[in-house]
Image (cartoon, grey):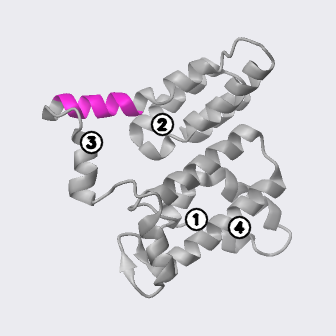
Amino acid sequence: MVAGCLLLLVKERWLWAGLTGALATATSPMALPLVMAALVPAVQELRRRRVPRALIAVALIPMGFLAYVALLGLRYHDALYWWHLQHEAWGARVDFGRSLLILLVHPWSGGYQGKGWMVWAGLLTAIALVVALVQARPPLLITSYCVGAFALMFVSNSLGFKPRFLAWAFPALIALAALTRRRGWQPIVVDSTGDE
């Protein structure tokens, strides 16, 4: 769904991009960086003094997540049920990278995100992916989506740079694979996309 939404955004199919993005965010909040991707063409249209039709996608994309949260709220008679569930069942919260930074300082300690040395490996992978994105120069909206995905991984105490979450930044993985295909690194890049 995320790939389809990004493709539709590149093709400027705002309504379909918004609907596809809404389906993506209904399945996982990790798709919410699609909103950042949709904001890029909206801002570009505003700068050209045109009506920002891309705002259709900006408005529709988060609706899937909001509808899911509302459905849970109605089902369990608690408007904040999704957030309560995340906090109480998983201990998930936004700590702006505090738990991640603690694990980086103590590489042999463990936390919700795993062992500190695993966090280092994920962080180094994320840095390599950002470098690959810069070198590959995809459309700005693709880069914005990846930056949003990395930011989401950083600020959450329960996400971190684990392989299954790094896969959400798949355009950066594609860029890295494309840049390394002639250097013999591609099998390593492809293998690194597996889950822990």
Q: Residues within 10 Å of mark 2 (few under 14, many from 20)?
A: many
Instruction: Verify whether residue 25 appears in magenta.
Output: no
C-alpha span from label 4 to label 1:
13 Å
Give me the residue at 35% from left, 70% from top: 112
The residue that mark 2 highlights is 24
The residue that mark 3 highlights is 82
The residue that mark 4 highlights is 128
Tag 4 secondary structure = helix
Comparing labels 3 and 1, the label whose residue is closer to the camera: 3
Q: Amino acid at mark 4?
A: Ala
**Of label 4 and label 1, which has the lower sequence position?**
4
Q: Amino acid at mark 2?
A: Ala
**Of label 2 and label 1, which has the lower sequence position?**
2
Give me the residue at 55% from left, 53% from top: 151
Residue 192 visible? The answer is yes
Horizontal relation, residue 161 to residue 174: left or right = left
- Magenta-colored span: 65-74
C-alpha span from label 4 to label 2:
26 Å
Q: Residue 193 got which mark?
A: 1
130, above or below 56, in the image = below
**Of label 3 and label 1, which has the lower sequence position?**
3
169, above or below 12, in the image = below
Residue 122 percent location from the top left of the image: 56, 71
